[in-house]
Image: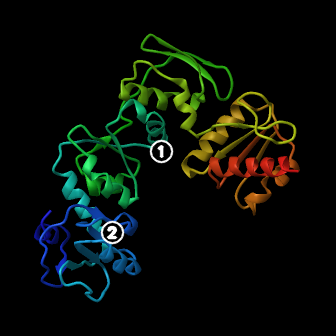
Amino acid sequence: MQINSILDIIDGKLLNSPSISFIYSFKTDVNKIKEGDLFIASNLDDVQIAVQRGAFAIITESFYPIIDNEIAWIKVDNITNAIVKLLRYKLATFNLQAYFCNIVSFNLLKALSSYEKNLKFISNNFDELLSSLDDINENTILISKDIELLNKLYPNNCAFEKEKFEISNLIEHSLFETSFTYKNIYFQKIKIPSIYVEDFIRIYDFLDISDFDDSKLKNFNFFKPTFLDKNFNIVEFGKSDRFIIVQNELSLIEKEVNYLEEKFSYAKKIYLSSQDIKSIENLKEIIKKQSFNALFITGFELEQIQQALLKEEKELSLF
């Protein structure tokens, strides 16, 4: 891409008269710089490294001395805005499908993304977005849970959750397993809570899945139980009447708590937040003092809780 074109797109100011006039690709991670790249420097400490690695152009927000007059030095008022403008320009060259969706749809789409190779998930990780530009084509489908960001990057987008879906013969085998019929197809004991069945069907329909593999849902972590034995060690799904649910999405906590209270009203339930668990390293000691069938934890990710429990199990097994 020509340097002059980049200047026009990002409203940048060229600070020197470089020998080079083009760059090959954009990078924000200095460790990924290759010869011919343009480096967008959020951290000025990385600039010299980028030059040493062969960057053809440097974009900065603050003043930095020109240490190589052969390459282009560009100053912008705001680095983030410059990145957004570059991404928007590149994406505008394609006629894409683009959707904004809620957090549940976003995570289900990620969990089932192997059914559709053309999905591209938009996040605030700009380096990831920039590095994936080379993979985008006319068949790419953009998915974002951040409507403001998507509007900046690709304004021609639409809502994902527009349609309602009719589900029949719904059977709740447990809090976590559901059977139902959709379009004359019977889904038997799918490991998904009934509160998220419609979200699942929306994804199933969108991806046009013909041969569904239930194991794909293992990567969907909303209202996903971690079962514990009498010693509070993790056991297989359904092998205990004691479990932990972890939710770190504020928008879903009330929904999941209400579901738990309604469907599991007879059981002993405990609710803990990150304020109650001062140190995750002491998690097992904290929960051993509790009497519960269901423990609902907020303020952590599921992986953090599971790793803390597994770490203590591993340490105990060494003695």
- The image shows residue 231, relative to residue 155, as above or below, that is above
Residue 54: name its quadrant.
Answer: bottom left
The answer to whether any part of residue 196 appears in the image is no
Q: Which residue is mark 1?
A: 103
In front of the other: 318 or 3: 318
Q: Position of residue 122 (x, y in %)?
A: 36, 50
Q: Position of residue 75 (x, y in %)?
A: 24, 80
Residue 7: name its quadrant.
Answer: bottom left
Left/right of residue 82 with respect to residue 287 in the rendered view: left
Q: Amino acid at mark 1?
A: Ile
Q: Position of residue 61 (x, y in %)?
A: 31, 79
- The image shows residue 23, relative to residue 60, as above or below, that is above
Which residue sits at x=82%, y=49%? 287
The count of marks equals 2
Q: Circle 1 — which element?
A: helix
- The image shows residue 279, relative to residue 298, as above or below, that is below
Which residue sits at x=84%, y=46%? 317
Which residue sits at x=38%, y=80%? 44
Q: Position of residue 199 (x, y in %)?
A: 47, 32
Colour basis: rainbow
Question: Do tag 1 and tag 2 residues touch (Cβ < 8 Å)?
Answer: no
Left/right of residue 119 with respect to residue 257 in the rendered view: left
Q: Amino acid at mark 2?
A: Thr
Q: Circle 2 — which element?
A: helix
Q: Which residue is mark 2?
A: 80
Question: Which part of the image, by quadrant, shows the N terminus?
Answer: bottom left
Separation of marks 1 and 2 at Cα, in angstroms: 24 Å
Crowding at dot 1, Cα within 10 Å, few <14 / some 14-19 / many 20+, comes out as some
